[in-house]
Amino acid sequence: MKELEKAASKEEAGIWKAVAEALSRSRKNRPEVNIYRINKHTQDGDVVVVPGNVIGSGKLAHKVDVAAFKFTEGAKKEIISSGGKVLTIPELIRENARGSGVKILS
């Protein structure tokens, strides 16, 4: 979480501050987003961050890169099989410190 706060202040990227705030909640209050919801709210080539868990319920019909706190094995397989990437939140910060074009799903 320190990496999120550092990225938020260094890059003046409000997205990482919002993600850090969501992750500071207790585990039971973090969002659980299923693959169906990611498919519904994204388009081909989008980059998404989930400040919680991604679960494997549903099908992904297009390529999406997803960063999250935690993934189920089914979710990982579905994202990869659609051509997308599975990332940790710190990996996404290293790739895109400004958070440009990243959507938050919660």
Image (cartoon, rainbow, N blue to C red):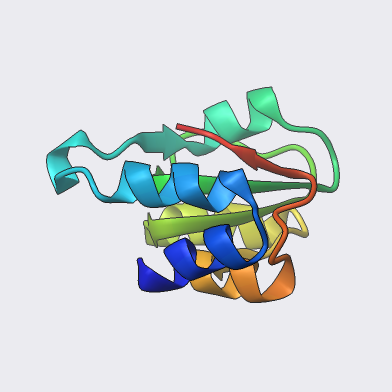
At 49% from the left and 69% from the top, the residue drawn is 6
Vertical relation: 47 (above or below) 57: below
Q: Is residue 8 left or right of residue 81?
A: left
Q: Quadrant of the N terminus?
A: bottom left
Q: Position of residue 53 (x, y in %)?
A: 36, 48
Give the residue furthest to the right: 44
Q: Position of residue 24 (x, y in %)?
A: 25, 50
Q: Position of residue 30 (x, y in %)?
A: 27, 40
Considering depth in this image, is 89 or 66 the residue closer to the camera? 89
Give the residue furthest to the top: 40
At 34% from the left and 42% from the top, the residue drawn is 22
Considering depth in this image, is 77 or 29 the residue closer to the camera? 29
At 41% from the left and 47% from the top, the residue drawn is 51
Q: Quadrant of the C terminus?
A: top left
Considering depth in this image, is 44 or 47 the residue closer to the camera? 47
| Occupied quadrant, residue 29 | top left
Looking at the rendered structure, the number of numbered marks drawn on it comes to 0
At 58% from the left and 74% from the top, the residue drawn is 91
Q: Position of residue 76 (x, y in %)?
A: 51, 60
